[in-house]
Image (cartoon, rainbow, N blue to C red):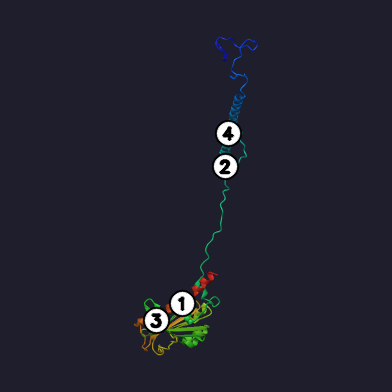
């Protein structure tokens, strides 16, 4: 049996025998000094392994603690609890999560309701836009569908009774009519006067409309190319109101012929002018409501 790296047949090295040969397992260099670089490398390798073991051990310990905490929390929330687990741990639902769980709240918003156009034409306090016969009935003619009416004379007075006949004069005066505007239109031998009476309030206009009867007649307006009409002949009249305005029509033949129920052209003319008067009054309210909403 041989020991170390000595040659075969040589006696083993005896440190107490000066004649024995020292084995060469320390270094193969000629100067017989230790290889310090190799020793340093070996030491560094051992240190690295030690650090790695410490890191792995710490990670395993952390995992173990996490598992223990998880087990404790679950047990605390269950029906039974380990004897050595704390009894004052909060339930799972009480443990704060990564977020607060709060969501922003906002007050419900909604667009303001649109302004009512009728509100602006129901009282003199709000109905402040300019007003005249030409504003209500602009241009030199009026076209409705395929029907064209030529515009004739116009009149504007604050003496409402002077532009009315029969019982209408008294009704307008009693309900404090402040203004009466009239326009006459003609088409194919038919003439019609439309009149708009102005009051301070809607209640006054509504009352004037309700008090009108078959003898409440608007005075026809003639002149220029339009001959006098509906002075003695039977004519067709209408009465209505919207807001603080009451509007009337009187339609008949320019040749003085009496109107009968078969004369649809006369009825159509009066209805067209009444409808147009209503639209113009309503448009007046819409224009003022829109302007107020944009202020």
Q: Which residue is mark 2?
A: 92
For disc 4, the neighbor class at 10 Å (few under 14, some 14 to 19, many from 20) is few
Tell me the quadrant of the picture where the C terminus can be found: bottom right
Indicate left or right for 279 with 9 as reference.
left
Q: Residue at x 45, y 76 (%)?
A: 279
Residue at mark 2 to residue at mark 3: CA–CA distance: 85 Å
Mark 4 or mark 2, whichever is nearer to me: 4
**Frontmost residue, 162 versus 91:** 162
SS at mark 4 in the image: helix
Figure check: 211 above or below 66: below
Q: CA distance from mark 4 to mark 2?
A: 25 Å
The answer to which of marks 1 and 2 sits earlier in the sequence is 2
* Residue 76 quadrant: top right
Looking at the rendering, in which quadrant would you find the N terminus? Answer: top right
Q: Which numbered disc, 3 or 4, marks the residue that appears first in the sequence? A: 4
Provide the residue designation for mark 1: 280
Q: Earlier in the sequence, mark 2 or mark 3?
A: 2
Q: Residues within 10 Å of mark 1 (few under 14, many from 20)?
A: some
**153 displayed left or right of 294:** left
Task: State the residue in front, 291 or 157.
Answer: 291
Which is in the foreground here, disc 1 or disc 2?
A: 1
Q: Position of residue 294 (x, y in %)?
A: 53, 69
Q: CA distance from mark 1 to mark 2?
A: 72 Å
Going from N to C along the chain, the mark reached first, 4 or 2, is: 4
Query: Residue under circle 3?
Result: 149
Q: CA distance from mark 3 to mark 4?
A: 99 Å
Mark 4, residue position: 59
Q: Quadrant of residue 238?
A: bottom left
Q: Position of residue 210 (x, y in %)?
A: 47, 80
């Amino acid at each position: 049996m041989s020991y170390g790296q000595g040659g075969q047949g040589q006696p083993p090295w005896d440190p107490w025998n000066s004649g024995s040969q020292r084995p060469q397992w320390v270094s193969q260099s000629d100067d017989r000094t230790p290889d310090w670089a190799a020793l340093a490398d070996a030491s560094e390798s051992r240190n690295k392994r030690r650090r790695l073991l410490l890191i792995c051990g710490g990670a395993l310990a952390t995992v173990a603690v996490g598992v223990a905490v998880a087990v404790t929390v679950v047990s605390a929330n269950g029906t039974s609890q380990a004897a050595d687990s704390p009894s004052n741990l909060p339930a799972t639902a009480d443990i704060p999560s990564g977020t607060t769980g709060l969501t922003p709240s906002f007050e419900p918003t909604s667009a303001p309701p649109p302004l009512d156009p009728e509100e602006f034409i129901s009282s003199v306090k709000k109905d402040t836009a300019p007003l005249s016969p030409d504003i209500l009935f602009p241009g030199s003619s009026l076209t409705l569908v395929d029907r064209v009416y030529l515009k004739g004379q116009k009149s504007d007075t604050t003496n409402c009774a002077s532009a009315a006949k029969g019982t209408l004069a008294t009704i307008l005066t009693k309900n404090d009519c402040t203004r009466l505007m009239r326009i006459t239109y003609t088409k194919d031998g038919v003439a019609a006067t439309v009149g708009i009476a102005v009051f301070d309030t809607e209640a006054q206009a509504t009352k004037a409309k309700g008090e009108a009867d078959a003898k409440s007649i608007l005075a026809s307006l003639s002149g220029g190319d339009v001959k006098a009409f509906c002075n003695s002949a039977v004519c067709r009249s209408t009465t209505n109101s919207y807001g603080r305005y009451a509007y009337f029509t009187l339609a008949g033949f320019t040749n003085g012929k009496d109107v009968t129920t078969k004369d649809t052209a006369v009825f159509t003319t009066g209805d067209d002018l009444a409808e147009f008067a209503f639209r113009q009054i309503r448009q007046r309210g819409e224009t003022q409501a829109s302007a107020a909403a944009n202020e």
